[in-house]
Image: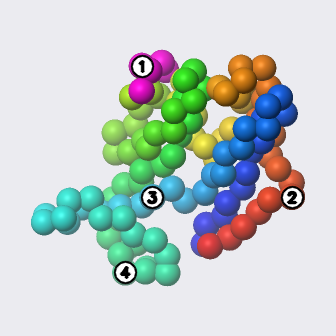
Amino acid sequence: MAECIRFVCDGCGHAIEAWSDGNPYYLDPVRGKVYAYHPHHDELARCIGNDAPHLCLACGAEVMVDSREPTRVCSSCGAEALVDTFELEGRPCPACKAGRFARDPAFFCVS
């Protein structure tokens, strides 16, 4: 089961929704990277990696980071400023550069 939370900038209101599980995948010789999600437990058991959404705190780009090739360097601007979207609590907002992200206590969902 995965949970979704939302972080909101206390300066400009910019919001990011973040899932706890990312995008688990396995490799297929024909199709390449194949994403697997619950409730498909047979596919999940084959997973060897996870593409997790990250936010660049320098330019605001949302990028995927592969657990098999982790990086902190943004593919959009080259800054070493990537943060997993599920870990944005207290981080500076790249949209307004003045506020910080706080978890929205009124938002929560599970899948």
Q: Position of residue 84 (x, y in %)?
A: 57, 41
Using the rendered view, name the quadrant where residue 11 is placed.
Answer: top right
Amino acid on which the number 1 mark rests in the picture: Gly
Residue under pointer 1: 78
Q: Which residues are magenta?
A: 76-80
Amino acid on which the number 3 mark rests in the picture: Asn
Q: Earlier in the sequence, mark 1 or mark 4?
A: 4
User: In the displayed structure, would residue 29 be above or below residue 41?
Assistant: above
- Disc 1 crowd rating (10 Å Cα; few below 14, some 14-19, many 20+) is few
Q: Earlier in the sequence, mark 2 or mark 4?
A: 4
Residue 89 in view: no
**Disc number for residue 42:** 4
In front: label 1 or label 3: 1
**Disc number for residue 23:** 3
Tell how many labels. 4
CA–CA distance in space, label 1 to label 3: 23 Å
> Residue at coordinates 42% horizontally, 61% vertically from top-left?
24
Amino acid on which the number 4 mark rests in the picture: Asp
> Residue at coordinates 66% horizontally, 64% vertically from top-left?
3
**Disc number for residue 106:** 2
Q: Position of residue 74 (x, y in %)?
A: 44, 27
Q: Position of residue 15 (x, y in %)?
A: 71, 43
Residue 106 or residue 68, whichever sits in front: 106
